[in-house]
Image: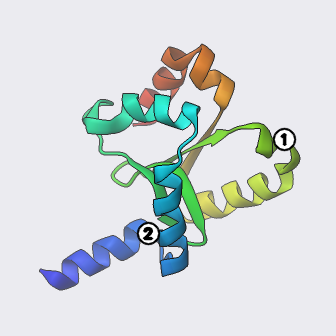
Amino acid sequence: MEIRKFINESRQSHGADLNIKSKAIDLRRNMTDAEKDLWKKLKGRRQRGMYFRRQHPYGIYILDFYCFKSGLAIELDGEIHLNRKVYDKERTEYLESSGLKVLRFKNEDITNRIDWVLSVIEMYL
């Protein structure tokens, strides 16, 4: 049973090291308002009974939201992302090359049209 748990955890975190895992814990404690709002809608298996994790370590990255069962990563882009287009593109390519589907939303989407965001997420579950 212990080996199964280790293999499953390794697949879910895609080999993230302890530094990334520690940073993810800090990010969970300091979520943005948009992340908090979306988390209220995702936690507790509220979307088609699917289990989501928040600020989940995955390789060298930390995913804003992650559903292991559906292979879905959800990224929220705030102001900092305006100057990180190349980084975000490379990150998305890496995640998709590992088999994930990546959905990106702007923080304003969460604030102004969360029902639309949830319907897009539903399509991919």
Dot 2 amino acid type? Ser
The residue most toward the bottom is 3
Label placed on residue 82: 1
Left or right of 81: which side holds 70?
Answer: left
Count of residue discs: 2
Q: Earlier in the sequence, mark 2 or mark 1?
A: 2
Residue that label 2 marks: 13
Residue at image point 48% right, 70% down? 21
Give coordinates of residue 64: x percent, y percent: 53, 48
Classed neighbour count for the residue bearing mark 1: other residues with Cα under 10 Å, few (<14), some (14–19), many (≥20): few
Q: In the picture shown, does residue 124 fall above or below 2?
A: above
What colour scheme has been applied to the protein in the rendered image? rainbow
Assign the N terminus to one quadrant of the image.
Answer: bottom left
Can residue 17 be seen?
no
Mark 2 Cα within 10 Å, few/some/many (few <14, many 20+)?
many
Residue 30 horizontal/vertical position (percent): 53, 48
Asked whether residue 11 appears in the rendered view, the answer is yes
- The percent coordinates of residue 16 (x first, y second) are 50, 75
Label 1 sits on a secondary structure element that is helix
Mark 2 lies on a secondary structure that is helix
Q: Residue at x 42, y 28 (%)?
A: 122
